[in-house]
Amino acid sequence: MAFKVKFWGVRGSIACPSPRHIGFGGNTSCIEVAAGGDRIIFDAGTGIRSLGQWMLKKDVKRAHLMLSHTHWDHINGFPFFTPAFLPDRSFEIMAGHVEADQGGIRKVLSGQMAQPFFPVPLEAMRGSLTFSDFSAGDTFNLTENIRVRTAPLNHPNGATGYRIEHRGKSVCYVTDTEHVPGEPDQNILALIEGADLVIYDSTYTESEFPEKVGWGHSTWEEGIRLCRAANVRMLAIFHHDPTHDDAFMEALELEARQVWSGAIVARENMRINLL
């Protein structure tokens, strides 16, 4: 059975549809994981709009949407996710950073679609939507063949890292998170140990990082250090800063590959087969 990853949005902070962002893409965070007959979507940035159009074309009727957190660049594509408006579609929307007694993830997404922010309310989505809140750090079985491990991340307002395990292979989604120089994040190391693919928040370079402390993001250099320490097979450098245009990213990619052959830079529409 297949275990595949596709990148629909790889940018962080804000979408940047410009001629200088064509090579790597300008849409914000959205990744699709196909595990057997099930689909998992990580985050609902602007990339989820194109994913939704593809799902309509392929008549995909159900999926699990797992949110790292609810800052705008990770949810503002959700109101444009067309399949959710169709009554014959089914989606479970999950998050580990929102307190259930405060309304949970449903309240957050509903608030984003309330006037005067958006003209179409959440209730207009006629698909079967299930909202599930958990605590970052929980482990659970999503299906008989898919196990999910989670971990809290160091980010303003909180965020959740995920590990999906399927038929002996694993992919980890670790964004948005800020590292402490010289102190490897033990939560992340435990989550990614021995993973086949780690998608990691690499918004800044090491030289840029000192001016961004407290902003909640990390570097590709730290991603490599973590992946090497945890015996990870492949790192996908992800959540590119909008100021990093194609020329910048090409130079970054060359440097990262020279540092560690297991590192790649995520591009929109990139596919990785794990099985």
Image (tube, rainbow, N blue to C red):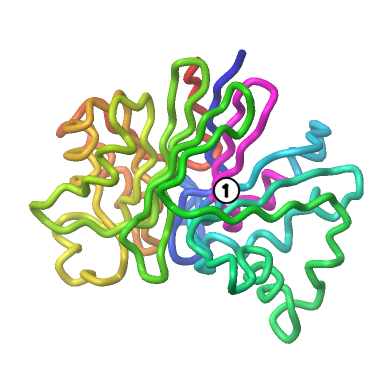
Q: Viewed as shown, does residue 187 lie left or right of 196?
A: left
The span shown in magenta is 30-52
Q: For this rendering, which residue is in front, 26 or 51?
A: 51
Residue ID at (85%, 55%):
85
Find disc 1 in the rendering and name its residue: 66
Q: Viewed as shown, does residue 112 lie left or right of 209?
A: right
Which residue of the protein is positioned furthest toward the right in this rendering?
Answer: 87
Q: Position of residue 271 (x, y in %)?
A: 52, 29
Which residue of the protein is positioned furthest toward the left in this rendering?
Answer: 182
Q: Quadrant of the N terminus?
A: top right
Q: For this rendering, which residue is in front, 251 or 134?
A: 134
Q: Viewed as shown, does residue 269 lie left or right of 237?
A: right
Task: Give the image quarter of residue 40.
Answer: top right
Q: Where 259 falls versus 162 (above or below)? A: above
Residue ID at (64%, 50%):
48
Q: Position of residue 139 (x, y in %)?
A: 47, 39
Q: Position of residue 178 (x, y in %)?
A: 27, 59
Residue ID at (81%, 35%):
57
Residue ID at (59%, 17%):
2
Q: Secondary structure at mark 1?
A: strand
Residue 245 seen anywhere in this rendered image of the structure: no
Q: For this rendering, which residue is in front, 69 or 146?
A: 146
